[in-house]
Amino acid sequence: MANEPTAISPASLASLSTICYLPPWSRPHIIGIAGSSGSGKTSVASQIIKALNVPWTVILPFDNFYRPLSPAQREKAFANEYDFDAPEALDLDMLVNVLTDLRRGKKVEVPIYSFSEHNRTELSTTIYGANVIILEGIFTLYDPRILELLDLKVFVDTDLDICMARRLRRDIVHRGRELTGAMKQWFSFVKPNFERYVRPTMQQADVVVPRGLDNVVAIDMLIKHVQRTLASKSRLHLEQLGQLVGTKGANTALATKEDIESLDTVRVLPQTPQVQAMHTILFNRATTRDDFVFYFERLMAILIASALDYVPYEAKKVQTATGLDYIGLAATTEICAVSILRAGACFETSLRRILPAIAIGKVLIQSNSRTGEPFLHYLKLPSGIENKFILLVDAQATTGAAAIMAIRVLLDHGALPENICFVTYLADKRVAIRRILAAYPKVKVVVGKLEDQIRRRFIDTRYFGT
Amino acid sequence: MTSHEASSTPTVSITEAPPNVTVLQQTPQLIALYTIIRDIKTQRADFVFYSNRIIRILVEEGLNHLPVQATSVSTPTDLTYKGLKFEGKICGVSIMRAGESMEQGLRDCCRSVRIGKILIQRDEETAEAKLFYEKLPEDIKDRYVLLLDPMLATGGSAIMAVDVLIAKGVPVERILFLNLISSPEGIDAFAKKFPKLKVITGFIDEGLNEQKFVVPGLGDFGDRYYCI
């Protein structure tokens, strides 16, 4: 078995810590769409999102930011006498905070407003990981603080008669209002406020879209613009992942297996005869699936046990059945796991055999088969990860891109880098390991076998049979 | 690990032992597992679970002392992979009753392994170990034998069990003795009696008390695993 790992040399540590990984959501593209009530802002936003057809786009409606009403105000609201179309009705400060956080790539909670109760609900929606955010509302281009946070400013300029017709229809059919009340609101608040506050903001717009959704050419131009932006973000993302490997003079120190194994944040399973024989069974295409599952789980039990040595422990005194004391150790931190789907799910049986009650979160990160760019599709994490030791599991790390993104997701949710332990069966030593170490020098890495060449992902296919 | 005072330093296994003895690497996790099973307050469900975890580590370490042979296979991606394959037939032999607790750990690693049994009890009158029963695979002399007993106190019953195996024609160098906790006296006597036999133990404790129990130990392993 391996001896106590030696400490990393200060020189290579310094060079490692200079690089940082920024996922696509660390600087999302924010589009603002303004226009009169009933102008078709929401439809334009939806049309763009639908055409992009990728999960990391999100619409942020201004409506969520209405201020909670006092009982007196609520009474007026039910009598259609409350002015919802004045800037004061909205919590612009809160919106600015949310938008600022989103722009920094942070996870944000957006309140949910109830139109039937005229009040903010207890509920909220979480927005995280979006590359494109569309903010839509009549006052989108009103507040200078918001203008500064927008990358593209759009004004939908639809004839007010059409706006009124749409609005009345929506109020009556979908919001259960009376015709007279809805009319009263239009003429006393909506229209005058539009003329007073909203129409002047048209001059802030980069693009004015006349006729709303009917303007196919303009919508198409907007979609193309966003697609170009996404493509250039992808290029940057891939470039940045590429820079995490030695070429930029960063961690060329970690060129050999010995260099990697000498780090005290890295543990490669000792390649004992049994471990080597198990690799051989797993790599053999003639192995039955039954045997594959059995030996994979047997080997992962050893790997997970090895990772548990990174859990913080403290001395603990117990009394034994012989009446004497024994001073041993006890883990001080609760352990949870997060699997990077799909291959990480191969670990779950083994994890539960060792830690039966462990909470297991999931992150689905898929890489583009052509470019290798990773995308975050789905996320469900255990609660309280900021205080837990996290085993982040994946069967194979080839380019390291999925692991790097997953670690960033954990950090964004409050996990401490020193409490994250990335556990993988196979890892490419030249690319995957060095990228991970370069991006996160404090994260622990536990590997079953270091690979000299990039091996196509095959573990999950063999394990699940699909 | 915090160790402001000597009394808060965790105790790890004694490492001095005859050359044919392998002591498991004393990792923080292993010590934490031992701390749980030693604790008198640990209930049976946890005792069984955490003992099994140590046993699994012991079995994996034990299996590493078995021979392997070079082989090459084709991978799903159509490449040749040069690796190793298991060599030779094995069987387990548990010294009843406590040794049977280690069978599951062996089966978890070697699914269809044959398992023989030896019952040795201390004679109440002479205080010496006495063989009561044995049931072993017929071809045991052609197999590597993993002899299982979690506690090694004086070494009396383990020595007798090895004598039984030798009488059946098993070459002593093909016997591996797997053990959770041993006394320095017991391990010394046993390993020196059979210098070609390999011993894998998880922890060499401080010593023996007057009742010949390993101390600080964990009490009677069989009782804690099966009865109390």
Image: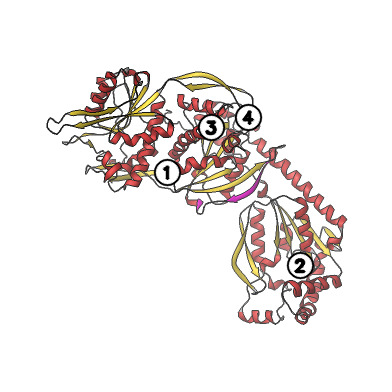
- In which quarter of the view is residue A122 placed? bottom right
Dot 1 lies on which element?
Answer: loop
Residue under pointer 1: A312
- Do dots 1 and 3 share one subunit? yes
Looking at marks 3 and 4 on the same chain, the residue that comes earlier in the sequence is marked by 3
Is A378 colored magenta in this rendering?
A: yes
Q: Nearer the viewer, mark 1 or mark 4?
A: 4
- In which quarter of the view is residue A197 placed? bottom right
Q: What range is drawn magenta here? A: A372-385
Task: Tell me which amino acid carries mark 4.
Answer: Ile
Looking at marks 2 and 1 on the same chain, the residue that comes earlier in the sequence is marked by 2
Residue under pointer 4: A454
Decide: is B58 above or below A411.
above
**Circle 4 residues within 10 Å: few <14, some 14–19, many ≥20:** some
Q: Which mark is residue A366?
A: none
Looking at marks 3 and 2 on the same chain, the residue that comes earlier in the sequence is marked by 2
Residue A412 point in image, percent of width and height = 58, 50
Q: Which mark is residue A138?
A: 2
Tag 3 near tag 2, CB within 8 Å? no
**Circle 3 residues within 10 Å: few <14, some 14–19, many ≥20:** many
Chain label for disc 4: A
Tag 1 near tag 3, CB within 8 Å? no
Residue under pointer 3: A292
Q: Nearer the viewer, mark 2 or mark 4?
A: 4
Q: Quadrant of the C terminus of chain A?
A: top right
Is A164 colored magenta in this rendering?
A: no
Residue B127 point in image, percent of width and height = 14, 31
Task: Tell me which amino acid carries mark 2.
Answer: Ile
Q: Is residue B185 visible?
A: no
Q: Is residue A255 left or right of residue B213?
A: right
